[in-house]
Image (cartoon, grey):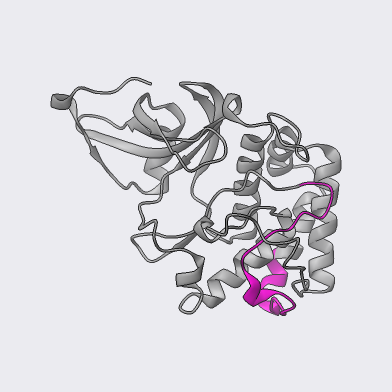
């Protein structure tokens, strides 16, 4: 991956989503490095945003995905984008702008990097952000998130708590694994139900949203997604999980 020389160093800028979209989609990746603690090859990259400026993004190439025994090979980057689409349809939780594009190591997901303190995780956020995190729990139920670690809840510089790392989602079997034990067995609340009902309605007809989703997931995965949403709508309660089976490792 190429790097600018020292006299060409640029400043990372936080853009509005509207301004960031064309840069994230079309900008040249001019540098970056591998994120060492990721289980798959994941890169924090710099995208040229014009003279003296860069946009930082998280790039997860298909070619860097490690084989898993329970998820089809080469599909995790598509699940990242599908999760972003579901988050936008629901209106929650906040998921950073994500798209699919070519990068230095081929096709993959590209997501705006959220500037944050990596030492702050879910366990630090739950007391002051309980209600926003309730939406994370409902989202994880709908997308069948098998990897809700503490570090996958990120506090941005604007005070928004962001949901990241959604590669292990949409499995046909129940795979929910989460550190959000405060919500185990708890009611998710009636305020989320209209959004879930709207998602079900959107999934039931052909539209731009379902066209995109069909490119990311199988027909069976989409059918089961709708069924999970219907189950949450009928019984908006988080299941009582088994701590021996339903907690990801490591926790953060």
Residue 114 drawn at (x, y percent): 40, 51
Question: On the picture, is 159 further left or further right than 245?
Answer: left
Where is residue 4? Give x, y as percent: 24, 23
Q: Is residue 176 above or below residue 23?
A: below
Residue 1 among those drawn in magenta? no
Report the side of 11 relative to 235 (left or right).
Answer: left
Residue name at image x 66 percent, y 51 percent: 86
**Residue farthest front in this picture:** 244
Residue 173, placed above or below residue 230: above
Q: Residue 151: where, in percent of width, then height?
A: 50, 57
Q: Quadrant of residue 177?
A: bottom right
**Residue depicted at 84% across the width and 65% down the height:** 231
Tally the numbered discs. Answer: 0
Residue found at the far left of this picture: 7
In terms of secondary structure, what is the magenta stretch mainly? loop
Task: Look at 36% across and 30% down and name the residue there.
Answer: 32
Whether residue 29 sits left or right of residue 6 in the image: it is: right
Task: Tell me if residue 22 comes above or below residue 238 in the rendering.
Answer: above
Comparing 175 with 212, the one in front is 175
Q: Quadrant of the N terminus?
A: top left
Give left or right: position of 57 versus 60: left
Horizontal and vertical percent position of residue 38? 52, 41
In the image shown, does 123 or 103 lie closer to the viewer?
123
Find the magenta span and give its range: 171-195
The answer to which image quadrant residue 20 occupies is: top left
Instruction: Name which residue lies at 70% across and 36% down.
Output: 216
């Amino acid at each position: 991956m190429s790097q600018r020389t020292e006299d060409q160093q640029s400043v990372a800028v936080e853009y509005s989503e509207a301004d960031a979209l064309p840069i994230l989609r079309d900008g040249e990746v001019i540098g970056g490095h591998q994120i060492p603690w990721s289980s798959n090859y994941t890169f924090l990259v710099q995208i040229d945003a014009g003279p003296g400026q860069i946009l930082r993004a998280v790039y997860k190439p298909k070619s860097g995905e490690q084989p898993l025994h329970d998820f089809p090979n080469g599909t995790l980057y598509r699940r990242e984008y599908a999760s972003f689409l579901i988050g936008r349809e629901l209106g929650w939780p906040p998921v950073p702008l994500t798209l699919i594009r070519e990068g230095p190591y081929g096709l993959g997901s590209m997501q705006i990097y959220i500037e944050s303190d990596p030492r702050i995780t879910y366990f630090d956020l739950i007391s002051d952000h309980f209600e926003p995190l309730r939406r994370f729990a409902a989202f994880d139920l709908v997308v069948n998130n098998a990897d809700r670690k503490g570090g996958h809840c990120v506090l941005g510089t604007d005070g928004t708590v962001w949901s990241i790392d959604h590669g292990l989602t949409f499995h046909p079997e129940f795979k929910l694994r989460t550190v959000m034990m405060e919500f185990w067995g708890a009611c998710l609340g009636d305020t989320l139900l209209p959004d879930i009902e709207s998602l079900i309605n959107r999934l039931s007809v052909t539209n731009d949203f379902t066209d995109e989703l069909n490119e990311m997931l199988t027909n069976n995965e989409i059918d089961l997604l709708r069924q999970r949403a219907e189950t949450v709508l009928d019984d908006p309660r988080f299941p009582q999980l088994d701590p021996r089976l339903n907690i990801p490792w490591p926790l953060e």
